[in-house]
């Protein structure tokens, strides 16, 4: 079975992290973001994954080669010479996907429980050309709403940012299609949501299945931080053995992942919703909550970090306070006693002055 992941372009929403790595390779809970999807696909029987890319494909290919060998699958790159939207990449990969079997299509920014086996079962049962997974939201007026039959799941229409209530289910960015869908798509920039899905629905060829559990598009920093919390809460239920437990000298609060190679000092309070990456060194008396600290970073004593993403090989000085969605790119050096609130700091910068309001530091 095959799958196509829409990796896309420059990852501008997740800068400054994507200035160092393509977005699918940015760590999420100590694993490249796209690998959460690929490993779940493999468990569902997928043996060939196609990554639709138009940016830094050579870096993606090098990284994916080792994961393909580890998982015993094939991972191919399908490189666009121009942006092809969300449907055009299917046409570009037609020769790979068109083998008569259903195939998955995923947006690469999505994290959830990935119930692919349930999706396969539902798709085969209704027998139509396509299935979309949908997720419930509290504010449907911000999204395009999927209107479907409550009993069968057959989709009747799509309503973009409705001003009156027509439903609260939105496209979750996870699809299963019969290969016959490829005949609908030309090799040109095309939106699958706006140009292909409405036609399929009009022909009674598109169904919706509710996505259980959590869902988040983690393509920008505030949602990445929220998504980490949702993912760790899920891991508490599904794989509690992967979460950290308190050790002599420091305290763990709630759901936390700590890489075994990380070192944590005395009298620290870590959590909830914290991820500490490989080779990280945390000094004494540090407080971390709602944050990710990536590979090789040093956080010096008595620093306080909340609602932040700390990139690779950074140094956060003693008695610093980082808050408000602050994101440090690779190799950022923050001096002692500096306050950053909502700062986005580009790679290889040194910060010695407070940034009390949201700003981009270039």
Image (cartoon, rainbow, N blue to C red):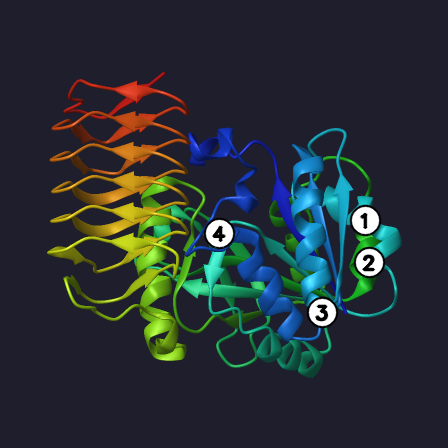
Mark carried by residue 93: 1
Residue 159 — which label?
4
Residue at disc 2, secondary structure: helix
Label for residue 46? 3
- Which numbered disc flags the more N-terminal residue, 1 or 3? 3
Task: Kindly state the secondary structure of the residue where label 1 is placed.
Answer: loop
Residue underneath mark 2: 97
Visible in this render: residue 279?
yes
Nearer the observer: mark 1 or 3; the answer is 3
Q: CA distance from mark 2 to mark 4?
A: 30 Å
- Tell me where residue 116 sits by quadrant: bottom right
Q: Decide: marks 1, 3 in contact (CB < 8 A)?
A: no
| Inter-mark Cα distance, 1 to 4 | 29 Å
Residue 33: x and y in percent read 51, 52
Compared across the picture, whether 49 is left or right of 12 comes to right
- Quick check: 170 above or below 43? above
Quadrant of residue 173 within the rendered picture: bottom right
Foreground mark, 2 or 4?
2
Q: Residue at 58% of width from left, 79% of height from top?
A: 118
């Amino acid at each position: 079975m095959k799958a196509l992941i829409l990796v896309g372009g420059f990852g501008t929403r997740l800068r400054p992290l994507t200035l160092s790595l393509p977005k699918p390779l940015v760590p999420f809970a100590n694993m490249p973001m796209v690998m959460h999807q690929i490993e779940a696909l493999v468990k569902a029987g997928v043996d060939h994954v196609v990554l639709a890319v138009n940016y830094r494909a050579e870096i993606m290919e090098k990284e994916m080669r080792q994961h393909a060998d580890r998982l015993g699958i094939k991972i191919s790159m399908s490189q666009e010479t121009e942006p092809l939207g969300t449907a055009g990449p299917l046409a570009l990969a037609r020769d790979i996907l068109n083998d008569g079997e259903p195939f998955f299509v995923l947006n690469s920014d999505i994290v959830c429980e990935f119930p692919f086996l349930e999706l396969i079962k539902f798709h085969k049962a209704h027998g139509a050309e396509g299935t979309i997974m949908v997720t419930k939201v509290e504010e449907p007026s911000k999204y395009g709403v999927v209107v479907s039959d409550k009993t069968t799941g057959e989709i009747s229409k799509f309503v973009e940012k409705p001003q009156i209530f027509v439903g609260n289910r939105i496209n979750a960015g996870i699809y299963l299609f019969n290969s016959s869908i490829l005949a609908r798509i030309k090799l040109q920039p095309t939106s699958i949501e706006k140009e292909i899905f409405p036609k399929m629905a009009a022909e009674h060829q598109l169904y919706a299945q509710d996505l259980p559990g959590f869902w988040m598009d983690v393509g920008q920093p505030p949602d990445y931080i929220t998504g980490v919390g949702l993912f760790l809460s899920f891991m508490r239920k599904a794989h509690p053995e992967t979460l950290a437990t308190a050790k002599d000298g420091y305290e763990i609060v709630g759901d936390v992942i700590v890489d075994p190679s990380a070192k944590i000092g005395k009298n620290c309070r870590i959590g909830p919703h914290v991820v500490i990456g490989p080779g990280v060194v945390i000094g004494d008396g540090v407080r971390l909550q709602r944050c990710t600290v990536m590979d090789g970073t040093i956080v010096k004593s008595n620093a306080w970090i909340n609602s932040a993403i700390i990139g690779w090989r950074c140094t956060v000085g003693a008695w610093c306070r980082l808050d408000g969605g602050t994101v440090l790119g690779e190799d950022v050096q923050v001096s002692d006693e500096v306050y950053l609130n909502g700062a986005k700091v580009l790679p290889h910068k040194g910060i010695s002055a407070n940034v009390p309001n949201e700003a981009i530091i270039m």
